[in-house]
Image: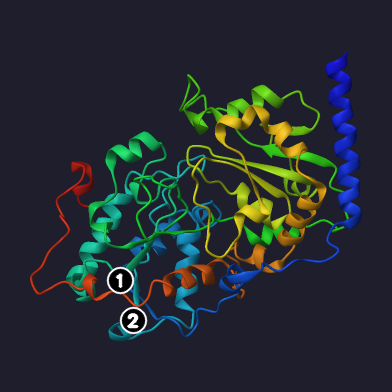
Amino acid sequence: MRKCLWLWGLLFFALGFAWSITAERNPCTERISGSAGDVLEDDPVGRLKVYVYELPSKYNKKILQKDPRCLSHMFAAEIFMHRFLLSSPVQTLNPEGADWFYTPIYATCDLTPTGLPLPFKSPRMVRSAIQLISSSWPYWNRTEGADHFFVVPHDFGAYFHYQEEKAIERGILPILRRATLVQTFGQRNHVCLNEGSITIPPYAPPQKMRARQIPPDTPRSIFVYFRGLFCDVNNDPEGGYYARGARAAVWENFKSNPLFDISTEHPTTYYEDMQRAIFCLCPLGWAPWSPRLVEAIVFGCIPVIIADDTVLPFADAIPWEEIGVFVAEEDVPKLDKILTSIPSHVILRKQRLLANPSMKRAMLFPQPTLPGDAFHQILNGLARKLPHPKSVYLKPGEKILNWTAGPITDLKPW
């Protein structure tokens, strides 16, 4: 009985707390102070030039024609980045004056009937494209890719597998070792994160989210919200491996807690519910990232990030510590105590920062593009890596990369 009363007391506290926050909700937005705000609002135009290789359509357009679902899945950044660059003022048609070279490959556009990407052909596809550009243009061979960038939004980037152990086992595609990887995966001290990589948000459909906006004065009456898997019985039947057990711990500890609105069911009101929530759980899954982070930012729900050592998108521009809550995976059983102990003035400030339109734009790949959106943040990241050091340019006849290294299956023709 005492436990029940305690839980209901917390519930009424949370609801009252939500209403009090709503009363002050969005009184104003708050600009990020210091250099982070300046970086977020940088304009990359005029700071770099990008040459886009014109590849045969089998590497991009024909793949998309075969399966248009690729336009809406969470790895679609590779498609929209290509389209953006073709109409961007940073594109140059003169490769001799380019700072960066971009190879438009839709390597994640190979979907199962249920819409899950299959990464297993990707290494051969990427390798084939690099063989083509290195034999048709002189620019790859000058640096062996050190002034080239690739968008690789797979679970573990250019390691092309959705399971961490197998991704580590197969390793990065050797011929990408000198290139800059623009990828959704980011985890400190992890072999799948190349030095100098640019971590980006996964794709979430901007138009769909915009259409589901509710009035900004709607009370945030949900304390903690989450929808998604807690275990993956098909790929992890024994449990404990998927999400390193963090999602299973959320379910086991809080499935009956009235402060937590959590379920595997994905309602039609999912976007609206996030806008009614104070905290949105963003735990790792197979990889340490998910679209929930983007959705939480767009809908003003404070992201609760449960993924140890994660590297979040555009970390030099977005002050994640100020807008989110970080919970160690081992501390998941204490999640209720952690969240209920956060002072209301801290929550209000996080909400004001989240209400800043520049924060939301930086997480989206909109069409048409907007100043400061994710496209521009990627370009800002590339511009900040300039000028290239002289050491990246090879001497005549010098070779660094081993073209025959890697799994035998990667060496087969594509």
Residue placed under numbered mark 2 in the picture: 98
Q: Residue at x 61, y 39 (%)?
A: 327
Q: Is residue 212 visible?
A: no
x, y (%) of residue 148? 32, 68
Which label is found at residue 147?
1
In this view, the residue in front, 342 or 146, is 342
User: Is residue 358 positioned above or below 237 on the image?
Assistant: below
Residue 376 in sight: yes
Residue found at x 12% / y 73%: 395
Please say if the residues under marks 2 and 1 sit with CB atoms less than 8 Å apart.
yes
Query: In terms of depth relative to the viewer, which is nearer, 210 or 257?
Result: 257
In the rendered view, would you say 163 is above or below 397? Answer: above
Dot 1 alpha-carbon crowd within 10 angstroms: few under 14, some 14 to 19, many 20 or more: many
Q: CA distance from mark 2 to mark 1?
A: 9 Å
* Mark 2 burial class by Cα count in 10 Å: few <14, some 14-19, many 20+: some
Instruction: Left or right? Give the position of 220 relative to 111.
Output: right
Identified by mark 2, the residue type is Ala
Residue 287 x %, y %: 48, 41
Residue 326 in picture, x, y percent from top left: 61, 44
Secondary structure beneath disc 1?
Answer: loop
Between residue 38 and residue 150, name the one nearer to us: 38
Q: Which mark is residue 40?
A: none
Residue drawn 54% across the image and 51% down it = 73
Question: Which structural element holds mark 2?
Answer: loop
Q: Is residue 85 above or below residue 5?
A: below
Q: Residue furthest top?
A: 1
Specify the quadrant that holds the N terminus: top right
Snapshot quadrant of residue 211: bottom right
Could you tell me the amino acid type at mark 1?
Answer: Asp
Q: Position of residue 307 (x, y in %)?
A: 54, 40
